Amino acid sequence: MSTISAKGTNDAGAVGAGQAPIHCLLERFAAIDWLFSLGQQGDEQVEQALRQFADFFGIRHLDIRWLAKEELASFVEAICLEEDNIWQELRHVPERLKQQAEQAGKLEALLAIADEAPAVIFQHSFDPIFAALSPYGDHIVATAVGYMMYIGGMACAWELLSDLEGWETNPFLFLVSVVERGHWPLGGGNGQFVVI
């Protein structure tokens, strides 16, 4: 039985009624006005959220670099995750989430979230992201949608464990707040977190 309906969430299945924070988070994703601020720069709340996210993973003294629209395609084409110091911290998070879920008896719920949350985010994000980014090419659209599905999937997975000691602060909620403000957090390297 599906844990997440096409319109949002329900209380059945592996996630269950005890996971109201996940249901609320998916409803937040369903309500986002995707990339409405694309190209606008200098949002202090976005910068603060990006610094809090990086700080959570021990990356400090981070400058925020705002991309102009005309820089987006070349920046995305040049992304190299091996050189992204934020990705170097994030790449281990899925395995840590899985191990913790297994220990806590929540692996079935985590697998359901990993399967269904990105699908819900795709459903709500694809059309507006396509409308905003289609002039830059299909690869940019696909990359942006993939980022949003990753952010949302990780936020929901972490939220599943947020009642456990050491997992109370969900760092991916900082990125969710950036997305809700109409921006795309692209990652970072060389002491910068790039956002458009």
Image (spheres, grey):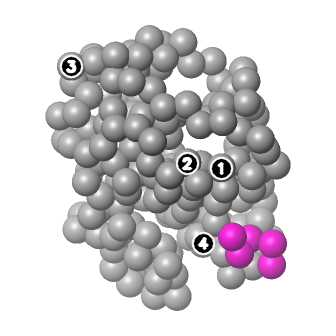
Q: Secondary structure at mark 2?
A: helix
Is there CB contact under 8 Å for labels 2 and 1? yes
Q: Of callouts 3 and 1, which one flags the residue occurring earlier in the amino acid sequence?
A: 1
Q: Considering only vertical position in the picture, is 190 above or below 181?
A: above
Identify the magenta region. 165-169
- What residue would you read off at disc 3? 135
Q: Of callouts 4 and 1, which one flags the residue occurring earlier in the amino acid sequence?
A: 1
Spatial CA span between label 3 and label 2? 26 Å
Q: Secondary structure at mark 1?
A: helix
The residue at the point 44 percent across, 48 percent down is 43
Q: Considering only vertical position in the picture, is 22 above or below 175?
A: below
Left or right: 100 in relation to 127: right
- What residue would you read off at disc 2? 47
Q: Of callouts 4 and 3, which one flags the residue occurring earlier in the amino acid sequence?
A: 3
Spatial CA span between label 4 and label 1? 24 Å
Is there CB contact under 8 Å for labels 4 and 3? no
Foreground disc of the pair 3, 2: 2
Q: Of callouts 4 and 2, which one flags the residue occurring earlier in the amino acid sequence?
A: 2
- What residue would you read off at disc 1? 51
Is there CB contact under 8 Å for labels 3 and 2? no
Q: Position of residue 72 (x, y in %)?
A: 40, 20
Asked whether residue 84 is in view, the answer is: no
Q: Nearer the viewer, residue 107 or 163?
A: 163
Q: Secondary structure at mark 4?
A: helix
Q: Nearer the viewer, residue 194 or 11?
A: 194
